Image (cartoon, rainbow, N blue to C red):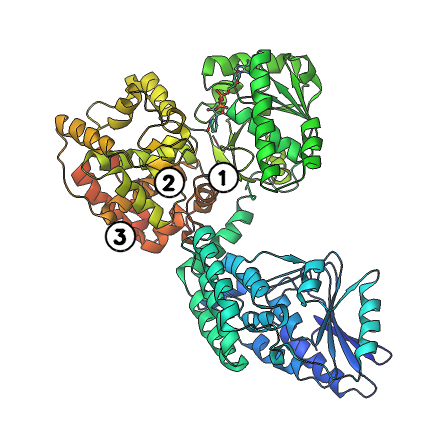
Amino acid sequence: MSELVQLTRQGPVAIITINNPPVNALSPGVIEGLAERLRQAQAEAGVDAVVVIGAGRTFVAGVDIKEFQRITSGEAPRTDGLLALLPAIESCSKPVVMAIHGNAFGGGLELALAGHYRVAAADAQVGQPEVKLGLIPGAGGTQRLPRLAGVAKALEMCATGNPVSVPEALRAGIIDRVIEGDLLAGAVAFAREVAGKPAVKARDRAGKLGTPQSNAPIFAAAREVAHKKQRGWKAPLAAIELVEAATHLPFEKGLKLEQACFRECLFSEQSKALIHVFFGEREVGKIPDVPKDTPALPVNSVAVVGAGTMGGGIAMVFANAGIPVLLREVDQAALDRGLAGIRKNYATSVERGRFPQQFVDQRLRLITPTLSFDGLAGVDMVVEAVFESMALKKEVFTQLDRVCRPDAILASNTSTLSIDEIASATSRPEAVIGTHFFSPANVMRLLEIVRGQATSRQTIASCMQLAKKLGKVGVLVGNCRGFVGNRMFHPYRREAQFLVEEGATVETVDQALYDFGMAMGPLATGDLAGLDVGWRIRKEHRHLAKPGVRQPLAEDRLCEMGRYGQKTGAGWYRYDEKRRALPDPGVNQMVHKWAAEAGIAQRQIPPEEILDRCIYALVNEGARILEEGIALRAVDIDIIYLNGYGFPAYRGGPMWYADTVGLPKVYERIREFRERHGEQWEPAPLLKQLAESGGTFASFSKPQSAAA
Ligand code: NAI
């Protein structure tokens, strides 16, 4: 018999213990073990009640997600062991008490819902997080939960996937008692109390299912929230529909519907993409030549140089993680401005109820303003965030090299400049690295960690570890102009502008990308970041432009007119006092006129072309980045795009998306664009190779990359 599930006794109470470390996932063997132990407990004389508990740090954290991949890839058949087990638990003649500590998530909560009672440790959590993987609860969660917790709570849990604390679960009726102290002892005592008393199964309860009248506004509100907050996601809407079904269908019929829906979700592109993202977030932490045991320097104190847009946000990120920060500026006015910005950001968070004023006060106390470099001598790490100028950055790094401890990490937040050149201003290039935060730094999850030629493994390991401590997803990238994210963003935005110059409108271009699922269209994104940023860079690098290769003309002209975007109240759009974008027909007319004067033919452009040109521009550049080893794996690019550029998670990232479209199709389309639009569309050699050999980006790996 499987040792994954054990049976012991304490007087009249049988104790079934699930022991499948690390998280007691319902992997093969566990469900069979549970079924067998339950049969034994039921048959055993003298047993009046049963307790089911998890060994180790948690109850059951869910079904093994790898199992889903094995099913969809055809490697393993779908077993419905859990579906068969749950009614067996419900119909057990002796009351079954589920004892929860740690997490009861997904299948774990569904298992618990089948018990006649649930008791829990006060710090445990319960949840149905399936929607985050593009799935719905597939073992009765959408049917039992509303019967136990009521429609509103079940909707919230099944459609958002967010966990619920035990006190909240107690109020909702999911948990029957909170156990202080030893969980097993408390569960056994509870089991003794309920032994011999009739127990009501969740499936037979109807008191909380509401009426059509009372439910209608609840479902309407849930759908509205799903459309707004999970735009484009299919699973949340499916979960809502199933909870709604629970209110008017008999239990067994509801279960059947849930089953059909679960299967549909499991095989959907969205779920496959979201599972790819789930594993991708773990994968990006693995760096072939920087193993997990590489000694890392603990970062317990930092300095941020520059208190502008980024420096201020970065200081908040450190303070939020409890790390004291010295914030250095050139003069008092700049320092005051920076601190005022930080205070304003925190005040908005308090207003929105994100955290209490007392937290903010604690965090602000961790930020010490300074005008001098002297205090920097003691810190473990410095992040430089001064203006994007190589001369200035070198000057700052020379200073840092002089004052900082020999083992301190010197990081730059540059978005385009060479880490190697910056490192050359110091006597310790091995300690120099790029930490490219995204704007707003205190909100965006992405941290591109840029490895220079000389950056040591210890420095890399320290920054990867630091990213976790800061609550960021750290992705290691190689050193090149724009690194991964901005290097790909450049051709993406170039195509968006070309499309308007060829006759599309600003609104149709942005709408096509928004409908695809991007958080914002490419032109609106330009307005948000400031069109003048790119304009300045282009002016500086104009001499590097390849003659004969088409360059966008519209943004430079808009900048010449003072239209820098949101900050000046106008760019591609006009902005009202609340910074809401309003279409500006004058811009379309102007751009079409400039383009026609420059000899660019005007035509109607279908939305598919808008989408393909923008997204495939990302993919083609991504393929070059992958081939050059600037990104370690295609999934690293995907994670960068999901966390830094608003790419829809349910499409898995640009490289995954290209794989799902099929690389031969993508390659053909890019060849077509090459013929029609010129050499900026030259297909990346890796794309050609993979398209012709039947490969995918996901399966391509270049050993020892993300190096300079
Ligand atoms: P900013 O112009 O808002 O701030 C720069 C600050 O640096 C100013 O307050 C200035 O007084 C200060 N400064 C200049 N020299 C200094 C010195 N020697 N010591 C201390 N402070 C000094 O610039 P922003 O936007 O914060 O950019 C900073 C860096 O972050 C740049 O390298 C930029 O490329 C990069 N970055 C910017 C992003 C953005 O969206 N703004 C996104 C990601 C990276």
Q: Eyeballing the image, is 439 above or below 45?
A: above
**Mark found first going from the N terminus, 2 or 1:** 2
- Would residue 673 appear left or right of 402 to someone viewing this image? left
The residue that mark 1 highlights is: 704
The residue that mark 3 highlights is: 665
Q: Amino acid at mark 2?
A: Gly
Q: Amino acid at mark 3?
A: Lys
- Proximity of marks 2 and 1: CB atoms separated by less than 8 Å: no
What residue appears at the point 54 percent right and 67 percent down from the top-left corner? 137
Q: Give the secondary structure at mark 2.
A: helix
Q: Amino acid at mark 1?
A: Gln
Q: Eyeballing the image, is 248 above or below 412?
A: below
Q: Nearer the viewer, mark 1 or mark 3?
A: 3
What residue appears at the point 64 percent right and 12 percent down from the top-left corner? 372
What residue appears at the point 73 percent right and 77 percent down from the top-left corner? 96
- Distance (Cα) linking label 2 and label 3: 16 Å
Question: What is the number of the mark on residue 622?
Answer: 2
Check disc 2: other Cα within 10 Å, few if <14, some if 14-19, many if 20+. Answer: many
Q: Give the secondary structure at mark 1.
A: loop
Q: Position of residue 18 (x, y in %)?
A: 71, 69
- Distance (Cα) linking label 2 and label 1: 18 Å
Pick whichever, 55 or 573, lies toward us.
573
Q: Is residue 706 visible?
A: yes
- Would residue 208 appear left or right of 577 to someone viewing this image? right
What residue appears at the point 65 percent right and 35 percent down from the top-left corner? 320
Tell me if the residue at label 3 has its CB under 8 Å from ligand 1: no
Quadrant housing the N terminus:
bottom right
Q: Position of residue 577 (x, y in %)?
A: 41, 31
Q: Position of residue 221 (x, y in %)?
A: 48, 59
Q: Position of residue 139 (x, y in %)?
A: 56, 72
Residue 43: image quadrant is bottom right
